[in-house]
């Protein structure tokens, strides 16, 4: 598995640990029950239900291994030590589109925690990358699928 360090908020890391715990307990128990039910139906060599349950078990174990890897390489970000003089991870940044004047506020988070509906964008997204390191009042020229857009950094908070 990867040894890529990922940074999380307390909320994001708790969510990841909760999902891992759920898969290990309830997920494994459900798969074991499905395999037992399929096994009770007779000949395993021609039992599609048994094969499907074993495949599901393999996928579940792969997901558990992936989550364990993520959790073991996760680092917790301290939200109290955020430098608000420039845009960085966990910054809440308000930007204004220079062309149409529309303002929007995003919180920059790790790729795994990104959720556009919640106003959280990844530092690896085009806009996130373009904003990193910018100070209040600076303009970021960001290449998006719609073309190059200029955003002015209006405000930065923790």
Image: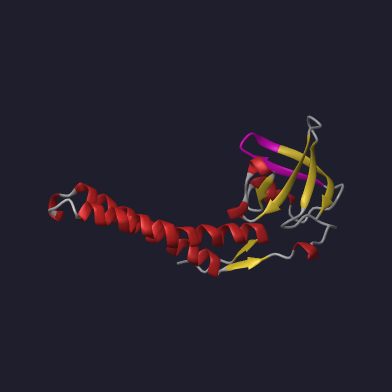
Q: Viewer-proximal residue, 134 or 109? A: 109
Whether residue 9 appears in this view of the structure is: no
Q: Quadrant of residue 96?
A: top right
9 with respect to 33 (left or right): right
Q: Residue at x 73, y 56 (%)?
A: 90
The answer to which image quadrant residue 29 occupies is: bottom left
Q: Residue furthest top?
A: 100
Furthest toward the right, the residue is 137
Relative depth, front residue between 36 and 117 = 36
Residue 14: image location, x then y, percent: 61, 60
Instruction: Decide whether residue 43 is among the magenta residues.
Output: no
- Measuring from the top left, give residue 22's x and y in whole percent: 48, 58
Residue at x 66%, y 35% (from the top left corner) = 147
Quarter holding the N terminus? bottom left
Establish if 22 lies above or below 99.
below
Of residues 17 and 82, the one nearer the viewer is 17
Which residue corresponds to the image point at 64% horizontal and 42% vertical from the top-left? Answer: 116
Residue range in magenta is: 139-148
Left or right of residue 156, residue 19 in this image: left
Can I make out residue 109 in this image? yes
Rendered residue at 79%/33% (across/down)? 102
Most common SS among magenta residues:
strand
Decide if residue 63 is on the left or right side of residue 95.
left
């Amino acid at each position: 598995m990867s040894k890529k360090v990922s940074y999380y908020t307390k909320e994001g890391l708790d969510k990841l640990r909760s999902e891992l715990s759920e898969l290990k307990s309830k997920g494994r128990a459900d798969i074991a029950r499905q395999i037992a039910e399929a096994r009770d139906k007779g000949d395993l060599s021609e039992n599609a239900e048994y094969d499907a349950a074993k495949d599901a078990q393999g996928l579940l174990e792969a997901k558990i291994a992936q989550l364990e890897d993520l959790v073991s390489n996760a680092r917790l970000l301290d939200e109290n030590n955020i430098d608000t003089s420039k845009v960085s991870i966990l910054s809440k940044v308000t930007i204004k589109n220079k062309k149409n004047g529309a303002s929007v506020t995003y919180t920059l988070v790790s790729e795994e925690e990104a959720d556009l509906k919640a106003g959280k964008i990844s530092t690896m997204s085009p806009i996130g990358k373009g904003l990193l390191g910018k100070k209040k009042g600076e303009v970021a020229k960001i290449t998006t699928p719609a073309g190059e857009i200029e955003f002015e950094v209006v405000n930065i908070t923790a």
